[in-house]
Image: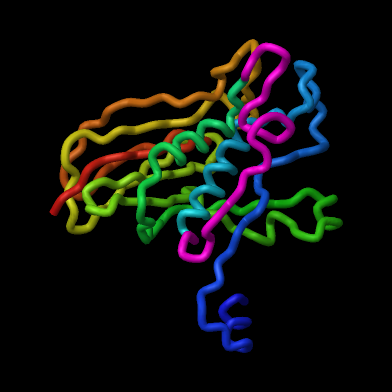
Amino acid sequence: MIDRARYVADVRHPVHVVYDEWNVWFPTREDRRRDKIVAERHTLSDALAVATYLNIFVRHCDTLRMANLAQLVNVLAPIVTDDSRVLLQAIYHPLRLASTHTLEFALDVAVDCDRIEHADTPDANRMTHRIADLGPFDVLDVAATSDASRSRVVLNVVNRRPDAPVEATVDLGSAQVRGEMTARVITADSPLTTNSFDHPEAVSVSERKVTVAGSRIPYEFPACSVTQLAFEVGE
């Protein structure tokens, strides 16, 4: 639509997009005031949604030049507070991984995987936009970045399947992995798991080193998870 408008108006310079406010919000949840905090209680499934948004931003970075989270602390935020404590919500973790490890250049990624059909509830017919209209959805949502020297790659993968891992192979083409791969994983016992002041790490990040070699990396992505794979490559 932007390209069409530029053509009609003979606008020669590029026009980019700013995504001014984005986040996950379910205002009908009954537990919004749990722990006496006026804040959304974000779940593991919300963390997957945030990770998916971040992947989309990477894939469309040629057009999308700014995306602002609403908000940073309290209400809908990844960080919530009371009078004396700070809690990191489930959605904090994909934001931290992305902000810490995303590299300078977005890579084109081809994904071949199963797809999920979504069925809306009957009351969804009253909504302007129904989720099912956007599907079907790939089980794996993927984005990748590299540094300027093309020697480092960071791969972000969301496994949307709620109850089963997905075995996949990362094919690097002519490139070869050098050294160990770092795997950072966000997951929990249930898609509805939330962090609280009593259980602040119910949704958290685990990190491990994985020995890999060659141009094809087999990896099992846990059910309902966000996984970040970081490794060095060479010809």
Please name the residue shown 43% across and 53% down the image.
113
Place of residue 147 in the rendered image (x, y in percent of width and height, measured from the top left): 29, 50
Q: Tell me which secondary structure the magenta stretch mostly adopts.
A: loop
Place of residue 177 in the rendered image (x, y in percent of width and height, measured from the top left): 19, 44
Observer-nearest of 10 and 56? 10
Please name the residue shown 30% across and 33% down the image.
182
Observer-nearest of 5 and 123? 5
Place of residue 141 in the rendered image (x, y in percent of width and height, measured from the top left): 48, 50
Place of residue 105 in the rendered image (x, y in percent of width and height, measured from the top left): 35, 55
Q: Is residue 204 above or below residue 129?
A: above
Observer-nearest of 2 and 159? 2
Residue 63 among those drawn in magenta: yes
Residue 103 among those drawn in magenta: no
| Quadrant that contains the N terminus | bottom right
Q: Is residue 104 above or below residue 101?
A: below
The residue stretch that appears in magenta: 60-86
Q: Is residue 182 above or below residue 114?
A: above
Please name the residue shown 57% across and 36% down the image.
47
